[in-house]
């Protein structure tokens, strides 16, 4: 499956699901296992996504789709964190029509660290300081034009000092 | 009978003899003596302003074991504390001169 | 544990044998020569650094760390302590007086003169000690030397001295020279089960990593005090830093502001004369 | 009590850069205190930034955001003198809000 097919089938699946949802909503039977309203779309704190352990599950819960790696997403993270409690991470992108940006730390107890809603007119770049339990891959997700793009870097983390 | 088995036959009685005499379990008095010695050494280190945190931990472990009635463990911990305290005293005394060699000239 | 003690004992024995050899110059105390030798050692070891760079400690030793520091300094975490310190400094005591009455120039821009040698008392007086003495003289309870209140006050006073070079004086008083020498001895004396002295890390290994952290050079190491450490998630005074360093080498720390610590601060500040105050600082 | 939110909003051209530092423990619930008991989770969940009533940025934070959290972003359409309203709410329902003028 070349990426293009993958993308095509992904959107096809989405479209079908969308149609399905509309049809069911029409019939008023939506309440069974309500479709998770994708948090990124509204302002409610995405509790479900923050509860997920792994990054893939968190991305699924947050956006309902998977991301593809893109060199248009510039993730800036230290090679060795000076301290796991304060790791300065920032992302910027040349992608247009960006609606959401998120940061995930794969090996943290809960992968999703932070998620930002980017309204129209706001620049697609965010800097923040996050906590990392240990050496881990850090991923930045950018939602642009309804599709997800990502960049990942490994950040080494360990304790400091000589013993105690 | 190969050499190996002959040696074995000799050592066997030796083991049985040792096992026969029970090793005396430490008692409360043993613990008190060991703890006092360790505490004294640690106080000396204190006078030299050079105690170690691990000595204090060993002393508390000794007391905890003694309170729980495990005097073997208590004496062992007290002995360890004494060794650590003595090492810290040795360190303080030897450093009285040794530090001069490290100074940036 | 027993083998650990054996190793330490043998290491100690080796050190004493090795160090016995070089004859040590007559024991005259010459602070000026000490300070020059101290600064020359570090400028030779790090020729690319300007003298003032040394006050940034680990961040002048490593590019990746420097970048993380610059990002943090955009909006530093010690901002809250700084504001709290200013508020506390300006709030009068119950008796109407305030800190400004205890310090020259109202306490503004004076941090670089601390610690100083008090010839009446014959002892080194550090900024933290002076602050608590001011509180007690005005009927207020002293602050803990290792907690946030003292850190906020010293943060504000350091901030008012930013950029001013350290200007520590040693009066021609044998007790002052003795205090300086006592501080130097503490700095180079190995202690704790790990058998490290301050010099083992900050003279012999600045720029090296000790697990995640990069060791700061001893030159200028107090210029950024008090510091907000990510490791502590909070502010730390010079007292707190000395106490935690001792504990890390498994040495039992002394009382904060005890003679050895104040003399150590006297020595370390004097040999950093001329380097600018950059406190409060952020550190890993 | 001074606000827990420190903010710098500087406009250059039609882009306004916003930096915010918020005083909050951001306890994750995974850390033990000196006695060895777990410190319960206490962290900011959402921070909203609004200009003239319109949201220009919304931050959803989890337990992995650093203590005294910091965030930087920029947006178009703000001009000098506008009011930037910032408010946060945490998992205990505590909240704080402040308004800053764009410089």
Image: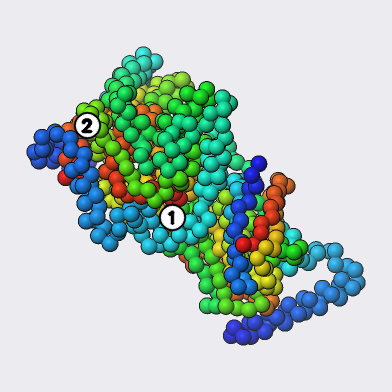
Q: Is residue B12 left or right of residue C84?
A: left
Find residue B93 and report its horizontal and vertical position in percent: 21, 28
Q: Which residue is mark 1?
A: A82
Q: Residue at x 43, y 34 (%)?
A: C103
Give the tally of numbered discs.
Answer: 2
Both on one chain, marks 1 and 2? Answer: no
Query: Does residue A62 appear in this view?
Result: no
Label placed on residue D81? none
Instruction: Specify the color scheme.
Output: rainbow
Q: Which residue is mark 2?
A: C172
Q: Quadrant of residue A118?
A: bottom right
Q: In the rendered image, which quarter contains the C terminus of chain A?
A: top left
Numbered disc 2: secondary structure: loop
User: Tag 2, which chain?
Assistant: C
Q: Is residue A149 left or right of residue C202?
A: right
Mark 1 vs mark 2, CA separation in Å: 43 Å
Q: Is residue A34 left or right of residue C61?
A: right
**Badge 1: residue crowd in 10 Å (few <14, some 14–19, many ≥20):** many
Q: Quadrant of residue C196?
A: top left
Q: Residue at x 70, y 60 (%)?
A: D83
């Amino acid at each position: 499956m070349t990426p293009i097919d993958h993308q095509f089938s992904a959107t096809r699946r989405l479209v079908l699901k969308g149609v399905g949802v509309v049809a069911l909503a029409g019939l008023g039977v939506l309440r069974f296992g309500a479709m998770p309203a994708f948090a990124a779309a509204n302002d409610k704190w995405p509790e479900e996504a923050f509860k997920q352990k792994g990054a893939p599950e968190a991305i699924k819960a947050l956006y309902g789709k998977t991301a593809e790696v893109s060199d248009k997403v510039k993730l800036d993270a230290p090679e060795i964190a000076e301290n796991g409690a304060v790791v300065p991470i920032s992302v910027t992108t040349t992608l247009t029509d960006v609606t959401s940006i998120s940061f995930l730390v794969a090996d943290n107890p809960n992968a999703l660290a932070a998620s930002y809603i980017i309204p129209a007119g706001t620049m697609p770049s965010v800097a923040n300081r996050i906590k990392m339990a240990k050496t881990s891959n850090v991923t930045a997700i950018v939602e642009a034009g309804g599709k997800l793009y990502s960049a990942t870097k490994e950040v080494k983390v360990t304790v400091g000092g000589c013993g105690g | 009978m190969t050499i190996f088995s002959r040696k074995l036959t000799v050592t066997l009685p030796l083991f049985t003899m040792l096992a026969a005499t029970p090793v005396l379990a430490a008692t409360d008095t043993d613990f008190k003596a060991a703890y006092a010695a360790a505490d004294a050494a640690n106080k000396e280190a204190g006078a030299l302003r050079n105690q170690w945190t691990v000595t204090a931990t060993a002393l508390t472990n000794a007391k905890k074991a003694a309170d729980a009635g495990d005097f073997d463990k208590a004496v062992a911990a007290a002995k360890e504390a004494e060794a650590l305290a003595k090492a810290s005293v040795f360190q303080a005394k030897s450093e009285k001169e040794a530090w001069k060699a490290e100074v940036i000239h | 544990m027993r083998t650990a003690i054996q190793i330490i004992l043998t290491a100690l024995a080796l050190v004493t044998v090795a160090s016995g050899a070089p004859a040590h110059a007559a024991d005259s105390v010459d602070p000026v020569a000490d300070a020059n030798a101290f600064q020359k050692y570090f400028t030779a070891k790090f020729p690319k650094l300007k003298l003032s760079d040394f006050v940034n400690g680990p961040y002048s030793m490593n590019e990746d760390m420097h970048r993380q520091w610059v990002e943090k300094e955009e909006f530093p975490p010690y901002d809250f302590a700084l504001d709290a310190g200013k508020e506390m400094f300006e709030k009068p005591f119950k008796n109407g007086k305030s800190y400004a009455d205890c310090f020259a120039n109202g306490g503004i821009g004076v941090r670089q003169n601390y610690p100083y040698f008090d010839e009446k008392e014959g002892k080194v007086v550090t900024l933290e000690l002076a602050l608590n003495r001011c509180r007690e003289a005005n009927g207020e309870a002293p602050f803990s030397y290792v907690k946030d209140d003292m850190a906020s006050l010293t943060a504000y006073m350091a901030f008012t001295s930013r950029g001013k070079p350290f200007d520590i004086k040693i009066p021609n008083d044998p007790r002052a020279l003795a205090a300086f020498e006592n501080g130097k001895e503490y700095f180079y004396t190995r202690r704790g089960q790990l058998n490290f002295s301050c010099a083992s890390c900050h003279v012999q290994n600045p720029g090296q990593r000790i697990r995640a952290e990069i060791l700061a050079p001893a030159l200028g190491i107090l210029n950024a005090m008090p510091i907000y450490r990510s490791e502590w998630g909070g502010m730390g005074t010079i007292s707190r830093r000395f106490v935690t360093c001792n504990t890390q080498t498994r040495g039992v720390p002394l009382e904060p502001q005890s003679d050895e610590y104040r003399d150590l601060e006297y020595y370390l500040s004097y040999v950093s004369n001329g380097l600018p105050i950059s406190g409060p600082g952020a550190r890993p | 009590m001074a606000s827990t939110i420190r903010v710098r909003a500087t406009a250059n051209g039609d882009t306004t850069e916003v930096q915010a530092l918020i005083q909050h423990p951001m306890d994750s619930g995974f850390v033990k205190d000196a006695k060895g008991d777990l410190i319960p989770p206490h962290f900011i969940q959402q921070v909203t930034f609004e200009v003239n009533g319109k949201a220009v940025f919304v931050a959803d934070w989890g337990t992995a955001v650093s203590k005294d959290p910091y965030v930087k972003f920029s947006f178009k359409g703000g001009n000098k003198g506008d009011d930037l309203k910032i408010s946060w709410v945490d998992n205990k329902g505590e909240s704080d809000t402040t308004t800053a003028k764009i410089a």
